[in-house]
Image (tube, rainbow, N blue to C red):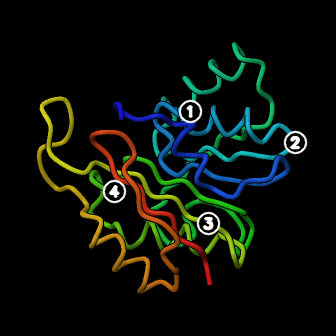
Amino acid sequence: MDFLSVNEVLSNLNLKRTDTVAEFGCGSASFALALAKILDKGRIYALDIQEGKLSVLKNKMALEKLHNIKTMVGDVEAPGGSGLKNNFLDAVVIPNILFQSKNRHGIMQEAGRVLKPEGEMLVVDWSKPVAFGPKENLASPDEVKKIGHQIGLSLKKEFAAGDYHYALLFVKI
């Protein structure tokens, strides 16, 4: 294993080239950028609450000549905060934001709201405190599974996402 292989993690999703997918809390947008290359006929929504992160992403998109990513400012902790329609997306990726949130349930509920039935939600987060990562407030896999169950998701797969992260793949029932 290694730190975190974005493409390897994304290979666990059941993606088609034409899918519509969002990355919640895109930050450095490594998932959105990788998705844009995989879903060359699809659409990616990169959401973050910080406009500065989205500006950096826009520069990366221009450098890599990627035109299938739409950047959006949004508060994914709030109901409707993503600005996306109900039952709209084929998948939502939530990488490394739950440990930063006081409202993990809200983030996952918003992702569930925008997912189509049978859509997939991929949660990737820190599995343990490390010197170069968060030391506290980690979201345990058990906590995330419990939230997923509460909002009507079915756990499809659990796996290690590198040496420092876990991944949980849910399906909207």
Cα distance in 3D space between marks 2 and 3: 19 Å
Secondary structure under tag 2 reads loop
Q: Which residue is mark 4?
A: 98
Q: Which residue is mark 2?
A: 41
At label 3, which amino acid type do we have?
Answer: Glu
Name the mark nearer the viewer: 4 or 1.
Answer: 4
**Which residue is drawn at the image coordinates 42% and 63% (left, top)?**
158
Label at residue 125: none
N-terminal of the pair, mark 4 or mark 1, is 1
Label at residue 54: 1
Name which quarter of the figure residue 41 lies in. Answer: top right
How far from the left and from the top, in percent, is residue 101?
Answer: 30, 57
Name the mark nearer the viewer: 4 or 3.
Answer: 3
Cα distance in 3D space between marks 2 and 4: 30 Å
**Which residue is drawn at the image coordinates 73% and 54% (left, top)?**
15
Secondary structure under tag 3 reads strand
Cα distance in 3D space between marks 1 and 2: 22 Å
N-terminal of the pair, mark 4 or mark 3, is 4
